[in-house]
């Protein structure tokens, strides 16, 4: 019965990855997936915040595994805004 509230997080990506970043804020993968969930919900500003956090953590931890996957969607979001100069 104690597991029921936690299972609510698994019903959709956004609550799941929001919960994951709250539980483990140092994990780049959680932030990367939160960014993806926000992008799928077309909340591009929140997606950008999550992707920046994922990339920042990956750089701090010297983990290129998550830096490139986080930086790539940031470039796409900049292009979507028409902000090409930021990503040159």
Image (spheres, rainbow, N blue to C red):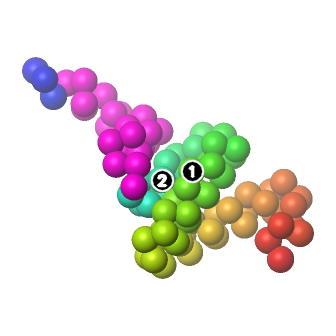
Image quarter of the C terminus: bottom right
**Magenta-drawn stretch, dominant element (helix, strand or loop):** helix
Image quarter of the N terminus: top left
64 shown above or below 6? below
Tell me: 55 left or right of 6. Answer: right
Q: Residue furthest left?
A: 1
Judging depth in this view, the residue of 53 and 20 nearest the camera is 53
Magenta span includes 15: yes
Residue 63 occupies quadrant: bottom left
Tell me where residue 50 appears, x and y as whole percent: 57, 50
Q: Provide the residue designation for mark 1.
A: 50
Q: Residue at coordinates 45% horizontally, 77% vertically from top-left?
A: 62
Tell me where residue 41 appears, x and y as whole percent: 60, 40
Q: CA distance from mark 1 to mark 2?
A: 5 Å
Tell me where residue 49 appears, x and y as whole percent: 63, 49
Q: Provide the residue designation for mark 2.
A: 31
32 shown above or below 44? below
Q: Which residues are magenta?
A: 4-26
Q: Residue at coordinates 48% horizontally, 53% vertically from top-left?
A: 31
Tell me where residue 37 appears, x and y as whole percent: 52, 46
């Amino acid at each position: 019965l104690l597991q029921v509230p936690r299972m609510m997080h698994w019903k959709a990506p956004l609550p799941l990855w929001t919960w994951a970043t709250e539980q483990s804020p140092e994990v780049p993968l959680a932030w990367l997936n939160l960014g993806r969930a926000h992008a799928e919900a077309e909340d591009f500003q929140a997606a950008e915040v999550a992707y920046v956090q994922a990339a920042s953590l990956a750089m701090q931890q010297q983990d290129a595994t998550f830096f490139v996957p986080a930086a790539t969607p940031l470039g796409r979001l900049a292009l979507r805004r028409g902000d090409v100069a930021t990503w040159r």
